[in-house]
Amino acid sequence: MKSLEELKQNLESKMPGVTSVLEEGCLVISKNDWLEVAKFLKSSPLYSFDYLSSVTGVDYPDRLEAVYHLYSIEKKIGPLTVKVRTDRQKGEIPSVTPVWRSAEFQEREAFDLLGIHFTGHPDLRRILMWEGFAFHPLRKDYVAEND
Amino acid sequence: MTEENLSTLATQTLEVSLGPQHPSTHGVFRMNATLDGETIVKLKPVMGYLHRNHEKLAEDMTYLGSMPYTDRLDYICSMTNNFAYALAVEKLAGLEVPERAEYIRIIMAELTRLVNHTLLIGFLLNDLGAFFTPVLYAFREREKILDLFESVSGSRMMCNYFRFGGVKIDFSPGFLEGVKSIIQNYPKFLDEFEKLLSENEILMARCQNVGVLSKELAISAGISGPMLRASGVPYDIRKVDGYSIYNRFNFRVPIGEVGDVYDRYYVRILEMRESIKILAQAVKEIPEGPFISPKGAAGAKAPRTFKPPKGQVYGRIEAPKGELGFYLVSDGSPKPYRYHVRPPSFINLTILEDMCIGNKIADAIVTLGSVDIVLGEVDR
């Protein structure tokens, strides 16, 4: 893959108004731009990230972070790690299921276990825990019943 | 009743809940199907019955402490689960793996692929109605490999054999002879299996053009492993990433044309033949030497002193079921801050509904069988 620097510059020149930050080899995108950037990354002939391998989240003391690992099957490049941050209370991030179908179950899982609300997801329900369960067990402040 | 009368009859769809306790669902998994006659119009998978919050457990123990737990993800392929996890942690901690250990790992991974694919084909025949005869022949062959696993790790299925920077122990005496006998005899078994199955009229009628998955949807839905390749995408992580020492071996990546159940069956047969090729090369070239690096051995003795530097990593391998990935975040302590598994069979289920709509209910069971799921991994 061409360097991350180059990708960032390319992204910002093709999509004015979008700002991204490079951090520990990851591309950090603001949540308001994420859906547009996702479409660009998939359709851009230079990168064509057609394969969204993994979607997950991390709970930090001050924020929730969704982490995406992208590959291109066509160009045989990757992984590109994209991070999108949100607050811990409302925790809203736009869903990329319309762009990559593989996000469908994985976003449901991140919603279930971490409480990230993926807006625009076609069917955002719990997937591993049962309906009516009140908590998000992968949050760091979750205390199990018998603890 | 005349044609005319029939068309005015009021009909309604029927909802059927298959599972969670149903022999065709390969564990505690449920499919809520809506049927119009016998045709599926809607199908929603329901999972989580085996959920034990594997990731949360792992975040509360040392890195090495999770190794035996990874055995229990895909409990048919514990060796490759160990492999993926060890690879991710080694990337995070910057550990080297000695030459001999790399070969040992490849031999274990390819033996596991034989186990998995053989068993999958046996169970697929179960789903097709050949109840338990083919699967017992599959079990017979699998048992020979499990005996070898037991001789090195002490356990048939929960091997817990890999360590960061190598493996737990060197081969037991006679192990390589055992692998050589498998290399010699497995093709004969595959020939026999194929003679009975590959051109079997019933199998072809039930599998061809059933559960078709297009190339485009397969890529977009993140499908991986034999299922992706059966849809005609020549993407094998062993080739693309060349992790461990896979780029030294000569093997081909079989692909399908139609993307139906039959292609998924046949791609797996061909993959087993390629695995045997890799095994033959590995057994021939394996050098003498240490089976774990000194740093790795120290970490394995005292897991609490093993503290990878701050950072994050995504490591993936071509597990028998597809792309098995581990995403780890380290804060410099002996426990991972975040530990995430990217399970192939969970993500491969995303398009189960798409493959089943328009097919008969009996075909849904075969389609699910060809996806190759293990609930220990789907639910985690």
Image: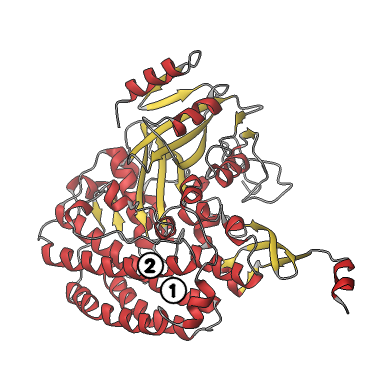
Tell me which label, 2 or 1, sits earlier in the chain.
1
Where is residue B106 shown, x and y percent of the image?
24, 59
Type of residue at label 1?
A: Ile
Q: In the image, is B301 to the left or to the right of A9?
A: left
Which residue in the rendered view is the most extreme toward the top? A17
Give whichever of B109, B188 is nearer the camera: B188
Q: Position of residue B309 (x, y in %)?
A: 32, 32
| Residue B177 vertical position relative to residue B104 in the rendered view, above or below | below
Q: Chain of mark 2?
A: B
Assess disc 1: are there few (<14), some (14-19) or many (≥20) residues with their C-alpha within 10 Å of its C-alpha.
many
Q: Report which residue position mark 2 lands on.
A: B268
Taking the spot 9% from the left edge, 61% from the top edge, the residue there is B288
Q: Which residue is mark 1?
A: B121
Picture quadrant where residue B195 is located: bottom left
Circle 2 — which element?
helix
Question: B82 or B333, which lies in front?
Answer: B82
Residue at the image point whose x is 54% and y is 42% from the top: A103
Marker disc for residue B255 = none
Residue lying at 40% horizontally and 35% vertically, measured from the top left: A48
Which residue is rendered at x = 56% and y = 35% of the image? A96
Give the structural element (helix, strand or loop) at label 1.
Answer: helix
Label pair 2/1, CB-CB below 8 angstroms: yes
Using a 10 Å C-alpha cutoff, classify the residue at mark 2 as few (fewer than 14 neighbours), some (14 to 19) or many (20 or more).
many
Identity, as a three-letter code, of the amino acid under mark 2: Arg
Residue B183 visible to the viewer: yes
Label 1: chain letter = B
Residue A61 in sight here: no
Q: Position of residue A10 (x, y in %)?
A: 38, 20
